[in-house]
């Protein structure tokens, strides 16, 4: 019935992928949203909240909620900066740094498994096509 519906197929895919990454990040006590945000903070410490939101293609309010959760878990800190008095720089804590290799490995394992199931070519093509559609609609 919805074979040609972009909305239905992308949201169904998103639910399937959400389950995969939820399992992967559960041992760390993180949701996929938290884990992906933390991976950005670990890779690019010092980003402003607006820069972090842009990097993840999410709204600032969504970024705020996820950042609040990560801060409660003591995985990041907000630090005042001279760059922008309205925003803080987002920095990972030592606890977050200690989790870096584990969460990156967990995510890589999901990707490896999906590439094996779909084939590397199909996986890469799908990611490229979905990204192109997303960027084109922004």
Image (tube, rainbow, N blue to C red):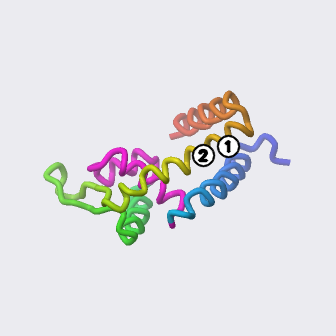
* Residue at numbered disc 2: 109
Q: Residue at x 65, y 51 (%)?
A: 17
As measured in the structure, the alpha-carbon distance from the residue carrying label 1 to the one carrying label 2 is 6 Å
Residue that protrudes farthest toward the bottom in the picture: 72
Q: Main secondary structure of the magenta part?
A: helix
Residue that protrudes farthest toward the top in the picture: 121
Q: At numbered mark 2, what does the secondary structure look like: helix, strand or loop? A: helix
Q: Residue at x 54, y 34 (%)?
A: 136
Q: Is residue 69 left or right of residue 129?
A: left
Q: Is residue 13 left or right of residue 136?
A: right
Q: Residue at x 35, y 62 (%)?
A: 95
Q: Is residue 81 left or right of residue 24?
A: left
Find residue 83 and report its horizontal and vertical position in percent: 17, 49
Find residue 127 and report its horizontal and vertical position in percent: 61, 36
Circles 1, 2 touching at the beta carbon (< 8 Å): yes
Q: Residue 113 got which mark?
A: 1
- The segment highlighted magenta reads 29-58
Q: At numbered mark 1, what does the secondary structure look like: helix, strand or loop? A: helix
Residue that protrudes farthest toward the right in the picture: 1
Q: Residues within 10 Å of mark 2 (few under 14, many from 20)?
A: some
Q: Residues within 10 Å of mark 1 (few under 14, many from 20)?
A: few
Query: How many numbered circles are shown?
Result: 2
Q: Is residue 15 above or below residue 119?
A: below
- The stretch drawn in magenta includes residue 41: yes
Q: Is residue 26 left or right of residue 49?
A: right
- The stretch drawn in magenta includes residue 55: yes
**Viewer-proximal residue, 20 or 62?**
20
Find residue 119 and report its horizontal and vertical position in percent: 72, 32
Q: Is residue 3 above or below residue 98?
A: above
């Amino acid at each position: 019935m919805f074979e040609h519906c972009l909305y239905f197929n992308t949201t169904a895919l998103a639910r399937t992928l959400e389950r995969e990454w939820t399992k992967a990040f559960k041992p760390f006590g993180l949701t996929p949203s938290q884990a992906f945000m933390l991976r950005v903070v670990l890779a690019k410490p010092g980003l402003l909240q607006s820069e972090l939101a842009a990097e993840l293609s999410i709204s600032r309010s969504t970024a705020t909620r996820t950042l609040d959760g990560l801060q409660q878990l003591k995985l990041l800190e907000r630090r005042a900066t001279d760059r922008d008095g309205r925003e803080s720089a987002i920095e990972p804590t030592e606890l977050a740094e200690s989790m870096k290799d584990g969460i990156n490995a967990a995510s890589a394992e999901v990707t490896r498994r999906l590439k094996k199931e779909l084939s590397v070519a199909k996986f890469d093509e799908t990611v490229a096509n979905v990204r192109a559609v997303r960027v084109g609609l922004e």
